[in-house]
Amino acid sequence: MPRRHLIIGGGTAGLNAIRTIRDEEREESEITLVSAERPYSRMVLPYYLGATIAESHVYTATPASLAGWKVKALLGRRVTGLDTGASLATLDDGSTVQYDDCLIATGSRAARPRISGADGPGVHSFWTLEEARAVIAAVPAGSRVAMVGAGFISFTILNAILARGARLTIVEVAPRILPRMVDAECAALVERWLRQHDVDIRVGAELTAVEDEGGARRLVFKEGEPLAADAVIMATGIRTNLEWLEGSGIEVSSAAGGGIPVDDYLRTSVRNVFAAGDVARGRNRVSGELEVHAIEPTAQEHGRVVGANMAGRELAYRGSLVMNIVEVCHLDVASFGQWEDAAAEVYSAGQPLRFGYRKLLFHGPRLTGAIICARSADIWAGNDVGMLKGLVHSGVDLSAWKAHLARHPFDIKPAFMAARTVGALLPETVLGRPSRSPQLPQSAVIA
Amino acid sequence: MKVLSLIPERCTGCLRCEIACSYVQTGTFQPSKSVIRVSPFEGHTSYAPYTCTQCAEGWCMTACPVGAIAINAAGAKDVIDDTCVGCKLCTIACPYGTMFYDPDTLKAYKCNLCGGAPACAEACPTQAIVYVEAETADWVGSFAAERTARVLAGQVA
C-alpha cells in the first residue's frame, strides 16, 4: 500500500513539501492537501495591490499543476481536529483523512488590536488574498489611508498604497518605526526618508478607538489629535493558526512566540507529525535556540526538509536565519540574524546624507547579525546585502578583519572575499543535493 | 557543466568584462549594471573579477516565491523577467552578493552565463575570465587574502 501523506496548509511550506516529496520519493505515495485557500504567495500580494501584477500572478498552484503532482487537493476545507493516536484528521465538513504522516503548515493570520471599532466597516487587514481584494476596493486614488503599525508588513505595502494615489499616514504605538526589524538609528534614517516622500508618520501614538464619522473613519488616540481616514489598515502583527490542535496531544510552546517545538528533522512531539513555517518553533541557525521565524525563507526551507523526510530520508536541518528586506520609496532596508544583541560587539556607521547605514554585530570571530540601509540607486550597496547574509549564514572566521571593519563598517567586500566565504558556502545545500528548477504554474522552460 | 573560471592574477582591471556584461544583460554600457564585478586591491595595483558561481543550492532560485528563477540550457540560474515581481527576496537569500536589482526595470537580474556564450569571457583580453568545463570554486578567496594582508597589517592605506 502506498504511503499516505497529509499536508495541512497550502502556503509556502506546504507546497515546498509536496514538490520535494515528489522529487525525493522512490515509490509513489498518496498526497492529500487540505487548504482553506487556493494556494498563492502572500509575498507578492503587495504587487497585486500596487497593480504591477494581475491577480492570476499570485497563484503558486493551479488545479492542473496539482493534478500533475497527483495531489488530492481538498481546497476550501479546514482540518478541525487531529487524532494523533489513530493518525486521523477530521475536516470541517465532517469527513476524515487517514495518514501515515502529516505536516502541520497552517501559517498565521493577521491580528487586530482589541479596541472599539477594530473590526468595524472600513477597517482592513492585509494578509490574505481576500483581504488584499478588499483593500484594493477600499483604496482608490485620492483616498486617505491610515496604516496602524510601522513594522515589516506595513512597510511591504507602503509603496503599493502610494502607487494607488492614496495619501498615507502611518501610526505606530512604539516611539519609533520598524521596532522589530532595525535599530533606532536606522529607523530614524528611514523615517526621515519617508517624510521626504510625503508619508505622514505618527510614532508613540496609542490608538484607543476607530469611530465612524459620516461614513469615514476617525482614529482616536490616547493623546493627540484624532485622525480622519477613508480606509484603515491594521498591520498590527500576526497570530499563528494553532487553536485547532487543542486536544491533539501535539506540544505547543507556552514561551514567547509560541509555536510547535520541532526537532532538527522538523518532527513535533508526535513522531509522524511534522510542523513547518510560521507555526513551527524551529532552530535558529545562529543562536541555536528554538524560535518561531514567521518569514518566507524559513517556510520554504522547512517545507523542503519535511518533504525529504516524508519521502523517507533522515535529513537534518541546520536552522533558519532571521532576515528581512523591505524597499520603501526606493530605499532598501535589510537585517540579518541577531541584530539586536546586548552581548555582541557592535560596529556601526551612517552616511546620513546618502541615507546609508551599516551595523555589524560580532560574537568572537563570527558576524552574528547585521543591518543595512541604502538607496536602491546605490547599486554597490546591493552587493553588500547578499555578502552580509553570506557572512552571517556561514559564520566564517573574521578575526583578522574585525579591527578593519570596526573602522570601516561599509567595507564588507574585501573581508567577504579574503575570509574565503565563497569556499565555505559552496558545499552547503539544504537537501544535500543540487536544487532543481521550480515547477510553479508561471514558470516556463527557458529554451 | 561549463562555468566561468576566474583567474585574478591575470586581471588588469580594464573593466571590459563589466562593459560587455552590462550591455548584454541590460542594454546599457554601464559597469554599475554589470553582474560581474572587478574589485581593486592594494591601491588599484591588482584586481579580481567576481560573479555568480551558479551554486548547487541556488539560494535565489529556491527562495523565489513565484518560481521566477529557473535553470537555463547552459545550467545557469536565470531570472524569468515576466514572472519576477521585484520583491528582492532573492537578494537577501543569495549569500554571495551576486543577485542584482535593476531600479529601472524593477526586477531582479543575475549572471545567466549569457545562455552559454558569456560576454565577459569573450571580452576579457587576458583570459582572466574563461568559460570552461570545471567544478565551480572560490576563485578569488586566496588571491584576496594575499592581497589584503598588507592592508590589514597596516603597511599600506
Image: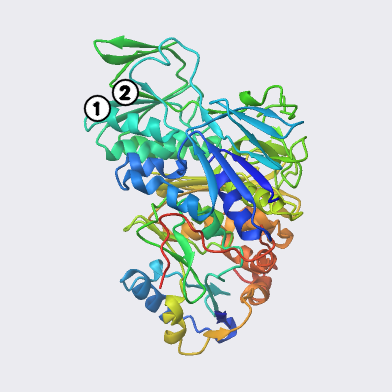
Above or below, comparing residue A288 to residue A234 in the picture: below
Above or below, comparing residue A18 to residue A439 in the picture: above
Report how far apart the C-alphas of labels 2 and 1 lie in the structure: 8 Å
According to the picture, the residue beneath numbered tag 2 turns out to be A231
Callout 2: SS: strand
Drawn side of residue B23 relative to residue A222, left or right: left
User: Callout 1: few (<14), some (14-19), or many (20+) C-alpha neighbours within 10 Å?
Assistant: some
Callout 1: SS: loop
- Callout 1: chain: A
Give me the disc on residue A369.
none
Residue lying farthest to the bottom in this orientation: B126
- In the rendered image, residue A233, in percent from the top left (x then y), is placed at 39, 26
Mark 2 or mark 1, which has the lower sequence index? Answer: 1
Q: Between B99 and A428, which is closer to the camera in this rendering? A: A428
Q: Residue at x 39, y 32 (%)?
A: A130
Q: Quadrant of residue B58?
A: bottom right
- Callout 2: chain: A
Mark 2 residue type: Ala
Mark 1 residue type: Ser
Above or below, comparing residue A325 to residue B33 in the picture: above
Above or below, comparing residue B2 to residue A16 in the picture: below
Drawn side of residue A432 relative to residue A163, left or right: right
- In the rendered image, residue A439, in percent from the top left (x then y), is placed at 49, 58
Give me the disc on residue A143.
1
- In the rendered image, residue A430, in percent from the top left (x then y), is placed at 66, 57
Q: Residue at x 73, y 59 (%)?
A: A399
Q: Between A196 and A172, which is closer to the camera in this rendering? A: A172
Can you see residue A181? yes
User: Is circle 2 on the same chain as circle 1?
Assistant: yes
